[in-house]
Image (cartoon, helix red, strand yellow):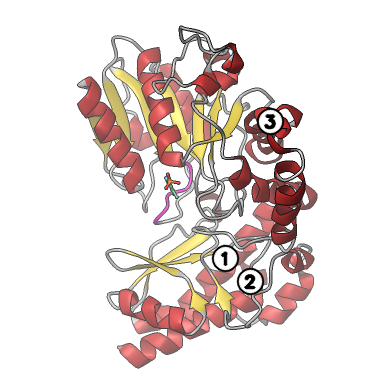
Amino acid sequence: MTSSVTTTVPASVLDAADPLSHFRARFLEPKNGEVRAYLDGNSLGRPLAVTAGQLKDFVDTQWGERLIRSWDDSWMQEPVSLGDRLAHVVLGSAPGQTIVADSTSVMLYKLLRAAMGGRPGRSEIVLDRENFPTDRFIVEGIAAELGATIQWIQPQSIGGVGPEDLKDVVCSRTAVVLLSHVAYRSGFLADAAAITELVHEAGALVLWDLCHSAGAVPIQLDAWDVDLAVGCTYKYLNGGPGAPAFGYVSADLQQQLQQPIWGWMGAHEPFGMSRDYRPADDVRRFLTGTPAILAMQPLKHMIELIAEAGMEAVRDKSVLLTERAIALTDELLLPLGVEMASPRDPSARGSHVTIDHPCFREVVATLWQRGVIPDFRPPHGLRIGLSPLSTSFTELQVGIEAIRDCLKEIV
Ligand SMILES: *Cc1c(COP(=O)(O)O)cnc(C)c1O
């Protein structure tokens, strides 16, 4: 595989050979042509070309004409129906276990709290120091609220957690283990199946954060026997800024768990206007308030685009893109003092590559002015995000050459 992406093959040849290259035209082309390379789809995916028209139709018809009747037409079902479609295409899970709602942070809070309640007598939460800030903060808040103990893992391997890091930590006191499937900084891809099994052997629950894998890396929540998962829809799922998160609760756990933010949308009969709260019998019990229907619309088309391409093909392209990014980095950037901060083994890597250099804060600021858009993550990481359906090999080439030129000017 590596041989096909060595730097001797021109990017144009790789684009011509790419079976997914035509999907690029399905994304909105910025009108002013100022962006030369967009390498941050892992933070904010690009809009689809149909999104603007689709939102206008939505306002004209579902909102403007059907008015409040749309809640009965379809909107009440949307958190679950969209969740089911996402589950089928992206998450490898059966219907009735996924909702689209809230932000990732709020969904994390709800499912983690529910997990704590589901393991009475156990008081420890396990997570790693390299996890995304919101994940760490939510856990710290819950620990403070419940008097729980946090068992911090310091990952040994390059920026990620493996089964070996968990063996001595997960025990009969563990209630829940929270991990990222793909680490936001290093791009490390965890072995979710093996880790889930290890957590279950200790009688604990696992919650996978799929923010950086959903839409880029194949996921099999049911086959892996995952208990809980959350993820956002604005990264590789192109749902748009602040699009609602998704939450997954395996069918066999739903009756045992109670989430902490009781609201009418999660109640047995939202329009029963009952005196007492009784949670819905199904996955709706993890809902709280009125769903963000407007903000869910762009996601629908991206899920269908992924269905059309197929998750396996998406992953194949993603691996080629990250392999190529590493090959170009080795040739053009390592001689300038840049260091690789992502795993070199593609089976241990998601869809972005992170490189380190003390000048990257300044370099990224300059690149943004030049229409080359990766992102910066302290202390000195530059992330090259590669969205398989919208990033071309030519764009990647332009991006890495711009990083090289910029570094040469600054250093
Ligand atoms: C992007 C991301 C989030 C985002 O949380 P929001 O509530 O949507 O702001 C959370 N966790 C991880 C691991 C992320 O990558």
Q: Residue at x 51, y 12 (%)?
A: 279
Query: Nearer the N terminus, badge 1 or badge 2?
Result: 2
* Residue position for label 2: 5
Q: What amino acid does circle 2 point to?
A: Val
Inter-mark Cα distance, 1 to 2: 7 Å
- Percent from the top left, x then y, of residue 343? 45, 57
Magenta residues span 181-185
Q: Is mark 1 in CB contact (under 8 Å) with mark 2?
A: yes
Horizontal side, residue 90 vs residue 334: left or right: right
* Residue position for label 3: 71
Query: Nearer the N terminus, badge 3 or badge 1?
Result: 3
Q: What amino acid does circle 1 point to?
A: Glu
User: 84 or 382, which lies in front?
Assistant: 84
Q: Is mark 2 in CB contact (under 8 Å) with mark 3?
A: no
Pick the quarter of the image with the N terminus. bottom right
Inter-mark Cα distance, 3 to 1: 46 Å
Q: Relative to 365, say whether 158 is above or below.
A: above
Q: What amino acid does circle 3 point to?
A: Trp
- Percent from the top left, x then y, of residue 134? 34, 44
Query: Which mark, residue 70?
Result: none
* Residue position for label 1: 323
Q: Secondary structure at mark 3?
A: helix
